[in-house]
Image (cartoon, rainbow, N blue to C red):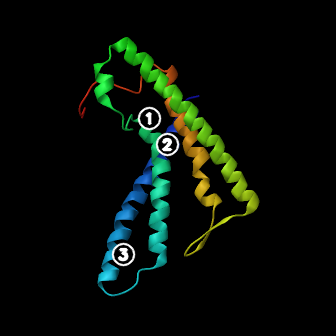
Amino acid sequence: MRYAQRGYSLLLNGMALLAAIMLVWLMVAVVLSVVIRNLGLQPSAWFFLSTEYAMFYLTLLGAPWLVRQKGHVHIELLTAALPLPVLNVLSRAVSLLCVVVCGVLAWKGLDLLLLNLERNDYDVRAFFVPKWMLTVVFPLSFTLMAIEFGRFVVGRDILHSGEAGIKE
């Protein structure tokens, strides 16, 4: 079981690292594109396409790690005012709702992925890109997010801290 937990953590951390690399690529590509345009040249269509796909991928690849780190945005004003027993119930209920939503999105994402594979669909822009390359992250990311939210439903820790303000 220890190896499974380690492998799972490596998967989450690897996805987050890949998302971070894509974020750096976004910065580099935007700067290069601006420099190329200022030189009077036309940047490659690949710059625009790769940054568009990177924004999509980095969001989905980083989200499961972000759930684990309790990094998602929530309104602390409400949770800070609740007594601990009520906060415990509310936080677990919110986490359960997140598990259900992520489960549905993972299922629908898998359905979309299989449909894209079956139809051999392409995203036609500057380049022809198989759509399954875009939708493959849906079932993976939303399944992992459901697992992470599930840890807050049944685990000792809850998603919301009950404290307002920055805790760094």
Q: CA distance from mark 3 to mark 1?
A: 35 Å
Residue nearest the viewer, comparing 8 with 158: 158
Residue at x 52% of width, y 20% of height: 154
150 in relation to 36, above or below: above
Q: Outermost residue, front direction?
A: 78
Residue at x 61% of width, y 54% of height: 135
Earlier residue among tags 1 and 2: 2
Residue nearest the viewer, comparing 60 with 74: 74
**Label 3: element kind:** helix
Q: Is residue 114 left or right of residue 102?
A: right
| Quadrant including the N terminus | top right
Q: Which mark is residue 68?
A: 1
Q: Which residue is mark 2?
A: 12
Q: Amino acid at mark 2?
A: Leu
Q: Are marks 1 and 2 in contact (CB under 8 Å)?
A: yes
**Label 2: element kind:** helix
Please tell me how crowded label 1 is: few (under 14), some (14-19), or many (20+) other residues with Cα within 10 Å: some
Q: Which residue is mark 3?
A: 33
Q: Amino acid at mark 3?
A: Ser
**Label 1: element kind:** helix
Q: Are marks 2 and 3 in contact (CB under 8 Å)?
A: no
Q: Is residue 114 left or right of residue 18?
A: right
